[in-house]
Amino acid sequence: MQPITNIVQLRQLLAERFPALRQFSEQPSLKAASWPTGLAAIDHLLRGGLPKSAISELVSSQLSAGSALIVAALLRQTCQTNQWLGLVDGRDCFDPAPLDNTLLSRLLWVRCRETKQALKAADLLLRDGNLPLLVFDLRLNPAAELRRIPATTWYRLQRIVELASTTLLVLTPRPMVQGAQVRLSLQSRFTLEALMETEEELLSRLKIELVQRRSFAGQQEGHAWIAEAG
């Protein structure tokens, strides 16, 4: 799979390959209110999965918290359900080496070098409206760049995603997505010893906290608590 490195290439790919994308997706799943991730630690907390037509934020303040595991699991879920996953890689940090080609064949990977470029790519993919799930990874982008993102940017993306059934998951190093319907905090801590464990074993040790869930009216629901898969 050839990586996408700029907006021009992304536009060309969408024009050439994705006008007929919906025929490969499972249409019944698009009618649901949530996108099941297949991860018990998330689906149980959110009573079914990530909300569609909304922004969810997954905060991971530590590099060894397991966010790469979650992206791989989401990709596996899209493959099993005959769908596609879009990944806007804000700092070109995604490592496809551990994944087999079957999974990668369902991935649209946009490699970016800076936050501004990544925001443009996410905007374009959301407006295209063909991807059921878009992961927007900003975990490794410089703090100075992230601070320059105006709150209006997130509200604009929210308005775009509301018009489709797309699920948008933003990975961040700190809470920063204004208007996110769901905010999760990744609390896992993996050491070098984790390299000796299987992916199934690692996923069973994921610890995720539900920090915030808002209703569509904008009211905050629930309270923070920890869920551990397994």
Image (cartoon, rainbow, N blue to C red):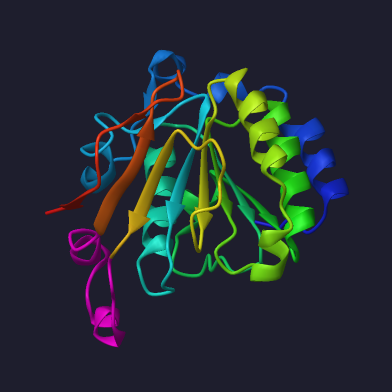
Left or right: 94 in relation to 4? left
Asked if residue 127 is positioned above or below residue 98 in the image, the reply reads: above
Asked if residue 27 is positioned above or below residue 102 in the image, the reply reads: above
Choose top left, top right, bottom left or bottom right for residue 125.
top right
Q: Which residues are the magenta region?
A: 188-206
Image quadrant where one finds the N terminus = bottom right
Left or right: 217 in relation to 159? left
Q: Which of 105/8 is in front?
A: 8
- The question of residue 189 being in magenta is answered with yes
Does the image show residue 130? no
The x and y percentages for residue 36 are 33, 33
The x and y percentages for residue 155 are 65, 33
Does the image show residue 177? yes
- Say which residue appears at 41% left-offset and 61% top-offset: 67
The x and y percentages for residue 14 are 76, 35
- Say which residue appears at 27% left-offset and 54% top-offset: 208
